[in-house]
Image: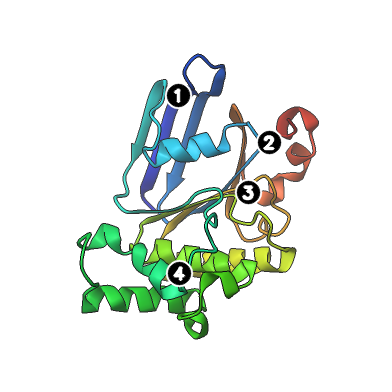
Amino acid sequence: MSLALRLEHVSFAYAHGTPVLRDVELEVQRGEFVAIAGPNGGGKTTLLRLVLGLERPTSGRVEVLLHRYGYLPQRAQTGIDAPLTVRELVGVGRVPRTRLFGPLGHGDREAVREAIDRVGLTPQADRRLSTLSGGQQQRAFIAKALAGEPELLALDEPTTGVDIEAQEALAALLVRLRDELGMTILYVSHEFGAVEHFVQRIVLIRERVVFDGAPSALPGVWHDPSHVHA
């Protein structure tokens, strides 16, 4: 594997605020499936936003060697009652790869069709999002990200409000997508009971990296209140 991204001595603070991240060191290889965990306010989302270039570090260096990103932010399902079908939503994800105006071309429509098929929503492609289950809506937003043919897929709290069965199904889907497409996946969450058996690494963040390793080495650290509880 080759390097996908590197953070070197990265710190970050919002204006007039206390630091959110302090001296973070992290490397992720291409094709890795990495979970980023920690308490609310511990810096998980900020770290992800730094990787995606949505924030700039106060100090240190962020180097990303991938060029196309797919991003599912927190509350991605806000506005789910809008009268969009799955196919229309996924088509929006094609915009970074095509022109902003006018109908999608044949190649774009094929990319949309393939993205929908990869997440198992072909039978629901022309249904409104509001008629789908929470797990299906989640898959629709992943398909939207896939339509842009990302090298990096970043998901921020994607399982909020979704039951354990759907969380496990999502994790299995992400593993399959990683294997089929060679994507690098960053998965941010404060809950990992349903996915820790699928990810290769778990990185615990509480301003700093307090653990970085295989899930099998996690239990002693995970249950230490000084590390993972707010």
Which amino acid is tagged 2?
Answer: Pro
* Badge 2 element: loop
Q: CA distance from mark 1 to mark 2?
A: 21 Å
In the rendered image, residue 2, in percent from the top left (x then y), is placed at 36, 50
Q: Which residue is mark 1?
A: 9
Label 1 vs 4, first from the N-terminus? 1
Marks 2 and 4, how far apart at CA: 34 Å
Q: Are marks 2 and 4 in contact (CB under 8 Å)?
A: no
196 to the left or right of 154: right
Q: How far is disc 4 from disc 3 in space, using C-alphas?
A: 40 Å
Say whether disc 2 or disc 4 marks the residue closer to the N-terminus. 2
Badge 4: how crowded within 10 Å, few (<14), some, or many (20+)?
Answer: some
Amino acid type at circle 3 is Ala
Q: Which residue is mark 4?
A: 84
Quarter of the image holding residue 20?
Answer: top right
In the picture of the structure, the residue carrying the numbered disc 2 is 39
Residue 128 coordinates in the image, percent (x, y) = 51, 74
Query: Which quarter of the rendering shows the N terminus?
Result: bottom left
Residue 112: which quarter of the image?
A: bottom left
Counting from the top left corner in percent of width and height, residue 78 is at 54, 54
Q: Nearer the viewer, mark 1 or mark 3?
A: 1
Q: Looking at the image, which is closer to me, 123 or 117? A: 123
The disc at residue 214 is 3
